[in-house]
């Protein structure tokens, strides 16, 4: 078994500069020792530097919010532009162990603890800290969560001129209504796909106006092709990692891989190179049946990203491993249909966003996928203050009713240390229950 | 006649009645102790339909959108666009009306008949309601508005204007104020103020704008888009400028001197309006969280009394 290393280990040396510059939580985490995984961490942590360098060199920076996977593909069609997700600020309070003051700044702006930790982005904008102030903010609203919509509107109230676009709620087709196939195998009403496509066309035009660049069909097709290459790499890594008898990647590293599909960490070329290295690593380990965790680890379906990355490592410490994930990134990993006009294709992948549909649909999709990976238990990681949080757990309980999988709900704050006892007790209990079911059927 | 239950001000009752079914707008909330994180207003709507009723839930917020999921009775989720300044958004609203029409026809309604006449009739009722409410004490006006929401009826005669009483005119802003919470009006009046601008969802803020009569005849759906979708201000809309334009107009016309903001406990959308109002800086703001009218009444009364003392 490959043993994780801490920050003091020589192999983790490239990450120490990030700890020295304020990412204090790194000292509490464990890392996969392979150089490809260390490079993955370094790539994610260095994004803000890349963005600042790009802006200083005259590049156009787009802050895409909430769509998680769609707008960056459009932006990739403009050579001098880069997109990133200010949403990602929700990890900063964890990474910086609250030393960055983002949440306190959001508090001062009246957006307190009753809102999801994504409110940290307000602090970044207000202080001009952590990421460069974008040249254009684009925010998806419609079926997005109220927390985010409220936080983004607060940002607009502070003077940011946000370009809003409508990402409508997913719905089933009405009787007799024309449908289209989505890349994840579902069907959506044609009218819904067309409405999203019209919105993307509006964004395309707005980006042209803002940057002076021409985003023609050929440029879009190239961007879509490049994005699909990244998505395919992420899908392959994820499938191998989740299916392998011995987990070839730790949970946090797998989460980082999924995140790369969202916006390529604002460097598409390096992103592809890095994913190639990770893929080679995973293939090598799977072929050798090498894992980072004991082979009998309980296979867990994990719902929602965690504001504190440490919690995923607690799962591993307590005898679990990821066997399926819904980190709200399904739409960013959905294959982009290459046989459609680019915007129509992007619209269909945007509709694969599980968060825009019902909790029942989301749970059902996650459970269907988890079955293929032999899941044994479910963790619903609730997001503090999230407006959708109260329904996710019950929906998941109903979805797994026929599977016999035990379900645990935990709420993960931005720094979970003070809740460690409660969270770990629940995880331990879940692992024990799942192990017992291997031999004793309910 | 089959009833169609809904709560959103963006669902036109005249559109529903044109299908030969009875629109019933409910403003009630569930008991305040519904489980943590669950919005009492969304829960109240979910509990409102009786057997055979149809339910229409507008997706104006996360909780409403998701509360449509668990229904087994016929339920229509009206996907209300959050954006409103684009042609695409208006088109989506119009298409949702058409989809609602097909739903109603599938569930016992008929194809819309004399939609323009229904539209103009309700436009007249709302005009009478507005005029009447301007003369009524705040609670009586709220009751008249709730009556129109529930049954479509409006007071038959214009009341005589209420004489000025020297109380401080304030605006109420927030989500639905359920009839069970109308005591807030009494509480505010007992403190020496009065709600002169009702910006709750069931209040005048939620009334459709006056209708273009010619457009109503030529293209009733376009008229509905105009007087509902493009006119009603709300906290969920992006951008939210309609809300502040409406508030500013009301402040000017009615001499409003403070805002009482009443968010539901789990409502991020209205809660985030608070700091924005503070930045806006036009008027002092008092936060009166839903439920405070009963449970924490003395505390709320003290705060409103302090506000009145400051303004007197």
Image: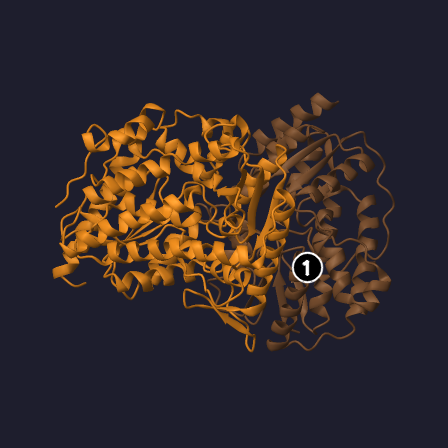
Chain colours: A orange, B brown
Q: Residue at 58%, 64% (x, y): give it.
A: A194
Image quarter where the N terminus of chain B lies is bottom right
- Residue A177 in the image: state x and y as whole percent: 56, 75
Image quarter where the C terminus of chain B lies is top right
Along the line of sight, which residue is nearer the eye, A389 or A337? A337
- Residue B192 in the image: state x and y as whole percent: 72, 29
Along the line of sight, which residue is nearer the eye, A379 or B39? A379
- Residue A102 in the image: state x and y as whole percent: 46, 29
Q: Residue A318 falls in which quadrant of the image? A: top left
Q: Residue A228 falls in which quadrant of the image? A: bottom left
Q: Secondary structure at mark 1?
A: helix
Q: Is residue A45 visible?
A: yes
Q: Which residue is mark 1?
A: B150
Q: Is residue B176 visible?
A: no
Q: What subunit carries mark 1?
A: B
Q: Residues within 10 Å of mark 1 (few under 14, many from 20)?
A: some
- Residue B194 in the image: state x and y as whole percent: 73, 35
Give the side of residue A241 with respect to residue B163, left or right.
left
Give the side of residue A418 with respect to residue A171, left or right.
left
Give the side of residue B175 with respect to residue A398, left or right.
right
Along the line of sight, which residue is nearer the eye, B37 or A271? A271
**Number of numbered discs on residues:** 1
Q: Residue at 63%, 37% (x, y): give it.
A: B261
């Amino acid at each position: 078994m490959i043993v994780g290393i801490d920050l003091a280990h020589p192999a983790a040396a490239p990450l120490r500069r990030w700890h020295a510059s304020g990412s204090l939580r790194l000292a509490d985490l464990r890392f996969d020792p392979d150089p490809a995984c260390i490079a993955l961490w370094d790539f994610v942590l260095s994004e803000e530097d890349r963005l600042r360098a790009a802006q200083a060199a005259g590049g156009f920076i787009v802050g895409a919010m909430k769509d998680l996977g769609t707008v960056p593909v459009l932006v990739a069609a403009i050579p001098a532009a880069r997109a990133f997700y200010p949403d990602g600020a929700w990890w900063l309070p964890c990474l910086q162990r609250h030393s960055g003051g983002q949440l306190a700044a959001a508090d001062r702006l009246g957006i307190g603890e009753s809102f999801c930790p994504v409110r940290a982005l307000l602090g970044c904008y207000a202080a001009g800290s952590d990421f460069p102030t974008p040249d254009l903010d684009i925010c998806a609203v419609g079926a997005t969560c109220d927390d985010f919509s409220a936080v983004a509107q607060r940002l607009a109230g502070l003077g940011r001129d946000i370009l809003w676009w409508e990402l409508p709620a997913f719905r089933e087709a009405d009787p007799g209504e024309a449908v289209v196939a989505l890349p994840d195998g579902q069907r959506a009403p044609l009218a819904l796909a067309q409405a999203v496509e019209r919105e993307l066309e509006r964004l395309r035009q707005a980006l042209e106006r803002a940057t002076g660049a021409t985003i023609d069909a050929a440029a879009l097709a190239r961007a879509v092709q490049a994005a699909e290459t990244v998505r395919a790499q992420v899908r392959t890594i994820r499938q191998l990692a989740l299916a392998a008898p011995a987990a070839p990647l730790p949970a946090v590293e797998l989460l980082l891989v999924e995140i790369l599909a969202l916006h390529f960490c604002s460097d598409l070329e390096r992103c592809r190179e890095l994913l190639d290295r990770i893929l080679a690593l995973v293939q090598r380990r799977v072929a050798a049946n090498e894992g980072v965790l004991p082979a009998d680890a309980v296979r867990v379906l994990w719902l929602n990203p965690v504001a504190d990355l440490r919690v995923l490592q607690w799962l591993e410490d307590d005898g679990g491993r990821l066997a399926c994930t819904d980190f709200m990134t399904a739409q960013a990993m959905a294959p982009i249909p290459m046989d459609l006009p680019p915007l129509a294709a992007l619209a269909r992948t945007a509709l694969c966003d599980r968060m825009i549909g019902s909790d029942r649909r989301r749970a059902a999709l996650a459970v269907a996928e988890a079955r293929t990976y032999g899941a044994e238990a479910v963790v619903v990681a609730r997001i503090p203050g999230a407006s959708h949080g109260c329904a996710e757990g019950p929906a998941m309980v109903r979805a797994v009713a026929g599977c016999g999988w035990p379900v645990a709900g935990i709420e993960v704050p931005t720094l979970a240390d003070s809740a460690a006892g409660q969270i770990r007790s629940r995880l331990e209990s879940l692992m024990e229950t799942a192990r017992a079911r291997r031999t004793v059927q309910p | 006649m089959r009833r169609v239950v809904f709560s959103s001000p963006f669902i036109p009752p005249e559109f529903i009645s044109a299908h030969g079914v009875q629109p019933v707008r409910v403003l009630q909330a569930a008991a305040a102790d519904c489980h943590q994180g669950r919005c009492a207003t969304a829960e109240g709507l979910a509990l409102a339909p009786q057997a055979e009723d149809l339910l229409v839930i507008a997706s104006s917020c996360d909780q409403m959108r998701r509360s449509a999921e668990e229904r087994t009775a016929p339920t229509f989720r009206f996907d209300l666009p959050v954006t409103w300044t684009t042609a695409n958004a208006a088109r989506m609203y119009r298409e949702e009306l058409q989809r609602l029409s097909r739903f109603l026809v599938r569930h016992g309604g008929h194809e819309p008949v004399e939609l323009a006449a229904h539209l103009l009739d309700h436009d007249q009722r709302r005009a009478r309601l507005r005029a009447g409410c301007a003369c009524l004490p705040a609670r009586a006006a709220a009751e008249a508005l709730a009556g129109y929401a529930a049954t479509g009826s409006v007071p038959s005669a214009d009341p005589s204007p209420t004489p000025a009483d020297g109380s401080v005119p304030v605006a109420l802003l927030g989500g639905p104020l359920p009839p069970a919470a109308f005591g807030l009006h009494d509480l505010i009046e007992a403190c020496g103020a009065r709600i002169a601008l009702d910006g709750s969802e069931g209040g005048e803020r939620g009334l459709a704008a006056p209708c273009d009569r010619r457009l109503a005849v030529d293209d009733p759906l376009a008229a509905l888009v105009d007087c509902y979708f493009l006119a009603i201000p709300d906290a969920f809309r992006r951008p939210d400028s309609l809300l502040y334009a409406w508030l500013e107009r009301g402040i000017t016309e009615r001499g409003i001197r403070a805002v009482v903001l009443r968010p539901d406990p789990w409502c991020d959308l209205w809660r985030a309006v608070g700091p924005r109002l503070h930045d806006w800086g036009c008027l002092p703001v008092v936060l009166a969280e839903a439920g405070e009218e009963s449970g924490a009444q003395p505390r709320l009364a003290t705060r409103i009394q302090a506000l009145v003392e400051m303004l007197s």
